[in-house]
Amino acid sequence: MPIPDSAITLAQKYLVKSGAGPIVNPGSLDPQTVDLLSTVLEQRKAELSGKQRAKILDGDGRRKLTAYVQLLAHDRGIDPGVVDGLWGPGTRNAYEDLVYFEANGTLPPAWRDDAPSGANPNGWPLERESKLMAFYGPVGENQTSIALPYTHFIAWEMSSKVNKMTVHKKVAASVQRVLKKTLDHYGADGIHDLRLDVWGGSLNVRRKRGGSGWSTHAWGIAIDYDPDNNQLKWGRDRATLARPAYQAWWGFWEAEGWLSLGRARNFDWMHVQAARL
């Protein structure tokens, strides 16, 4: 499992804070950074896995970096599992909690068993064709183009920028409010790092994949984000949008009454819709 480059920057930040020494090449796992990691790990070797201690201390820079991130997680009360210097799902999740702590000064709220909000201030209808027709009208009609608060990129053609999106008139203002809150909360860099700017489509007059009825996309009341990393049949164990870093994102949608199929049914995590189940 690849280690994100941002883990190097975070580790270097803590190395400086701990007094281990200055950083010569920020963002680079260079020999000087590896030497600093070696020094700190030697000082804290009693906290390393007994079975893996020698392999960590004698290992390469990535092994040392991983062990240090695991120790940092422990320092914040985050459980990465055994401090073994191996970057797996547990370490990845702990690292994401650590990043959240750095940004917010607190650990992320519990999310695994969190139920979607029951709020529905806009009165979105149930996802039944008769209800959707009565509320939104025929599929493909009553659409409008909205300006996006931040630039999106087409998931299947990342070189193409999207500054407008076509959605149903009744959901337009709600979408803009959610995305404005997203920009205010995460900032442009945070949005890009979390791939909340990778757009998988909105209006699309088609039937449901794996079903016979109209997709909510056919009314322009559904939006997909980062489909490559949140595929249709993926659950929490694989979908990136199920991770703690996205808790605020889902909160913004749910406060407006939108529904995540991922959070409600644990599939199609890319998808959010202005229709209730």
Image: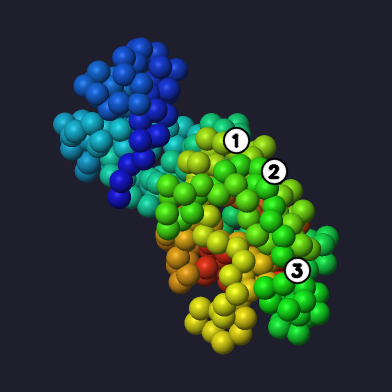
Q: Of callouts 2 and 1, which one flags the residue occurring earlier in the amino acid sequence?
A: 2
The three-letter amino acid code for the residue at tag 3 is Asn
- Is there a contact, CB below 8 Å, between mark 2 and mark 1? no
Please give the name of the residue rendered at 62% of the width and 66% of the height, measured from the top-left corner.
203
Q: Is residue 130 visible?
A: yes
Q: Report x, y in % for residue 239.
A: 46, 60
Image x and y of residue 188, in percent: 57, 36
Check residue 187 in the rendering and tell me which mark sits there, or answer none: 1
Earlier along the polypeptide chain: callout 1 or callout 3? 3
Q: Secondary structure at mark 2?
A: helix
Q: Is residue 134 left or right of residue 31?
A: right
Q: Which of pointers 2 and 3 indicates the residue nearer the eye? A: 3
Q: Residues within 10 Å of mark 2 (few under 14, many from 20)?
A: some
Q: CA distance from mark 2 to mark 1?
A: 10 Å
Q: Amino acid at mark 2?
A: Lys
Name the image colouring. Answer: rainbow
Seen in the picture, residue 91 relative to 241 is either above or below; the reply is above
Name the side, left or right, on which 83 lies relative to 247.
left
Residue mark closest to the camera, 1 vs 3: 3
> What amino acid is labelled 1 in the image?
Gly
Q: Which mark is residue 180?
A: 2
| Image quarter of residue 29 | top left
Residue beneath disc 3: 142
Quarter where residue 107 is shown: top right
